[in-house]
Amino acid sequence: MTDMKKKKLDSATVISIVIVLALYVAVFIAEQFIPATSMLFTVIKKGATYALVAVSMNLLNGFTGIFSLGQAGFMLIGAYVYGIFTIPVVSRMDVYQYYNGGLVQFTLPVFVAMLLSGLAAAFLALLIGLPVLRLKSDYLAIATLGFAEIIRALFQWDKLGPITNGSNMLRLFPNFNDFNIRNANGDVVVYLSTLVPLLIAGVCIFVIILLINSTYGRALRSIKDDEIAAEAMGIRLASHKRLAFCISSFFAGVGGAMLAMYQTTVQAKSFTTAMTYEILLIVVIGGIGSVTGSCLSSFLFVACSEWWLRFLDQKQVIGDFEVPLLRNGFRLVVFSIIIMIVVLFFRQGIMGRKELPDLIRQLQGKKVGGGASK
Amino acid sequence: MKKIIAIVLAMMLVLCAAATAETVKIGVFEPASGDSGAGGKQEMLGMQYANKETPTVEIGGTTYDVELVYADNGSSTDKAPSAAQQLVSEGVSVVLGSYGSGVSIAGSQYFADANIPAIGVTCTNPQVTAGNSHYFRICFLDPFQGTVLANYASKELGATVAYTLGELGNDYDQGLCTYFKQAFEALGGTVIPESFPTGTADFTSYLTNAANYGAQVFFCPVSIAYSTQIVQQANSQGVTFPILGGDTLDSNVVANAAKGTNVKIIITTFYQEGATPEFDEGFKAWLNEDAEAMTNNGGNDMISAVSAMGYDAYYTALEALKAAGSTDSAAVLAALPGVTLNGVSGAIAFDEVGDAIRNAAFVKTINNETGDWEFVAEQTVE
Amino acid sequence: MWNTVFPYLLSGISVGGQYALIAIGYTMVYGILRLINFAHGDVFMVAGIIMVYMAASGVPLWLCIPLVLVLTALIGFVIERVAYKPLRTAPRMSAMISAIGVSYTLQNLVLYVTGGLNQIYPTIPWISDSVTIFGATTKMVTVITPILTIVLVVALVALINHTKIGMAMRAVSRDFETSQLMGIKINRVISTTFVIGTFLAGVASVLYFTNYTTVIQTSGAMPGLKAFVAAVFGGIGSIPGAVVGAFIIGIAENIIKGLDIILFKAGIISGPMGLATFSDAFTFALLIIILAVKPTGLFGEKITDKV
């Protein structure tokens, strides 16, 4: 990272940073004026969560070439750790109703708990990595998927109930709305419930970008291109893969904590392989190996599935004409057909391997370098 | 720039005003798909029928059209938040639902944050209303239902060993199994609790477990999807113990599955066909003329208790709107605790937690020859 | 003890046979295309849905079964042509993601068509009847499944070893490009593989849903995943491996469901431990153990890296 500082930032990078900052400002302003019940904010909150998880998956699948399908498992760890340590002590009797209030009888500050979420996921990744990272491509994919399923079953086990609440929901922990600043009457003075999650995701993704552009990131990319050549160049395969796996899981864990805050409840049952597939689709649609692409496609994916296509699920009458086919479930049919079209005909995804600064350079008429922003 | 913003804002206000004038929106937060989809659809039928019967309401001297706004919570706690958020963004005055306690709890926070009251229809887990002021419910609770069933198992069936089976991560199943266990053990019985993972289709091993443990009753208050499987597999394994269930089993889908088998099924529920003849007749007539409603009811015109509850929930909401004298959700929330209704499923009034004051449940069984539900007893617990 | 354990074994062998039939589809496709066909479990589910709708529309059952099998095979053929063939030269991950996309599409289509409600599978006479063997009562299909599975596998192995198309399949799975140069019609071989695989999944669906009578859009996910694990467990690409793996996994998961009571009766534990929670997870644990010891599965060939 030291060599980053030495390098001069080119104009495209500066413009990109300005664009991102402008977006933050826009969100902050929008939040103060548009009613908080608008779907826009739901989409941004969930989109930010998915963006972080997608980028963390991209770090493995896109940049390192480790095809892992364990993302849902690490998110589950993150979500549970966050939930377990932040439920207010007074509410524990309600939440752990079948387990006498549970074992944990203290709470941690929100951000400490989030950090812990990431660390717990990373630690587990370290353990799982020992047997799993020795495997090759498809075998690795199915083994990580298997671990995610095992984690899910373990968290549902009745005997761990005093900690995990068995298969029952964790709830009543602080959620995004608690970031709003309220006055003494409980009225909201400054809305921050959308900006904060966006900031958390932004900071995490920024760290990942720094990592990708460091020497370490270049080593990872060389592993993706050719493991044996990379090893011959003196890159220690095992330790690099392990570290990439742990870092990716760390951010998946933080993403899990954010998902918990978004959903306001946590339940192991919902962290299925379908969730991992969904994130993988986001990565592919955005472009494997592009951080910008993963972020963009997360927001698009969430907006389409939660908001823009909702009308397809309801009967629509234009004049006297009732549009045929529209009923519950049609939205998902249209959505999956769009996904198939992208997968089959736009194989590079939205961004290919390009990043935002590359796009700007393109607009400026300069030659575009292949990989991530330099 | 300021001018443009002002114009846009003004236009938005006009549009909003035009859209909401003379219409009051009631959110329907129900599963239309997933494991509880069949039950959710039957509950919605009750609301739709009520809406057809009484499509307008007089609030503060103005007559409003009532519009039902649907959001499918997909029977799953991870889809519930966005469905709840969808209703909130539609600006509904009050929410009805859901079938299933887990999804109700999962959506709860969103309604609370938007200050929208919710009326639980058949979510029986105590956690739905406990510790909050915006969730109400018109049905009885699981500690009560569990006790009724445990009493019945112990006293009427003479059982001393019971096997309970619930879905992992389903708050309704797990809650009811726990309350059944507590009550049954208090009566001197032994309970073996087990759970199965979501998506299980093969219940033969669980049925074998129950037989191996020497269970005399098999208590499985699971969703309709699983209970039909359990009934069929119990039949092909030739089990001898009766199957006990909660209100979720009260569905013609389960009755169809049990038709022609030797499996004895006993359940507790909210409503018995015949209790309010006018409602029964009207509802059946509607089902018979509306093909889509008939399909959603499982293909015949048998009345499920959840439909009657959905019907009552709709009228409870109308009463609340009338009492509030406004379509503002906060006003409805303030008015709800005092609302009373003489519904088809019985008199409805709320206690301080927001639960309906009810102390009676109907015990029903399936006639294996005709595939009809038959009334067994009305049970109360002091 | 035997009376306690036997019913679990019986369920296990039955479900194992059904997994085996699905697993063959995974393993054959992988052997030839090196593609994990994630949509295979969903094709199995779609076969069930077709049966439900066909029987409901009044087609007699004896005609339904062959029609369903033909239609299922056709679906397999179409999926390959539409979703996988265009990606044959693309990186392997693209095809796999396309498979995930197909799986997503099939599930959502069925969700839309059925309205998300459980469909009750029609009762097929004779194989739905109850029988009692060694003191355990079960459906006839439970007994038939392992026998039928073995007959089909023997026939399949004969086809692969003794026919021209079988020889072509073996050649393609050994070396894709060389066999192309030798004049083997690659597209025909791949299509045949998909047709055979989905046909067997169709057979599995008839057996499976006769036993567990509800079909919903997610019905294929778990059996599909288990069958895939079975294929990896046995060494993906190997047909006998997939069959052995499927039976082991089927039996193991049912034993786990009854492990509490078995251990309890054997006096090892004093009360229920809730081990049934791990019936699905155990499958994956078994897989990871096998992979850690033998990274290419029980019967898998050793992969050598080419530099």
Image (cartoon, helix red, strand yellow):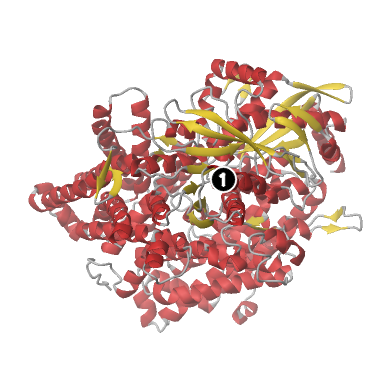
Residue B185, compared with residue B342, is above or below; it is below
Quadrant of image for the N terminus of chain C: bottom left
Task: Farthest residue to the right: give it.
Answer: A184
Q: Secondary structure at mark 1?
A: helix
Q: What residue appears at the point 47 percent right and 60 percent down from the top-left corner?
A: C277
Chain ID of residue with mark 1: B
* Percent position of residue C103, x then y: 41, 46
Point out the residue furthest to the left here. C162
Q: Position of residue A342 (x, y in %)?
A: 46, 46
* Residue A285 visible to an observer of this rendering: no
Q: Is residue C236 visible?
A: yes
The residue positioned 39% from the left and 36% from the top of the image is B262
x%, y% of residue A44?
Answer: 67, 52
Nearer the observer, B185 or C36: B185
Q: Please name whichever residue, A53 or C269, is drawn nearer the observer in this view of the structure.
A: C269
- Residue at the location (65% across, 63% down)? A201
Vertical placement of residue C151 versus A198, above or below: above
Q: Quadrant of residue A327?
A: top right
Q: Is residue A325 left or right of residue C1?
A: right
Identify the residue under disc 1. B155
Look at the picture and state if B314 lies above or below C172.
above
**Relative to residue B143, is residue A192 drawn left or right?**
right
Give the quarter of the image for residue C27: bottom left
Q: Amino acid at mark 1?
A: Lys
Q: If the image is split into quadrants, where does the C terminus of chain C sit?
A: bottom left
Q: Is residue B27 left or right of residue B161?
A: right
- Pinpoint residue B68: horizontal percent, then vertical percent: 69, 29
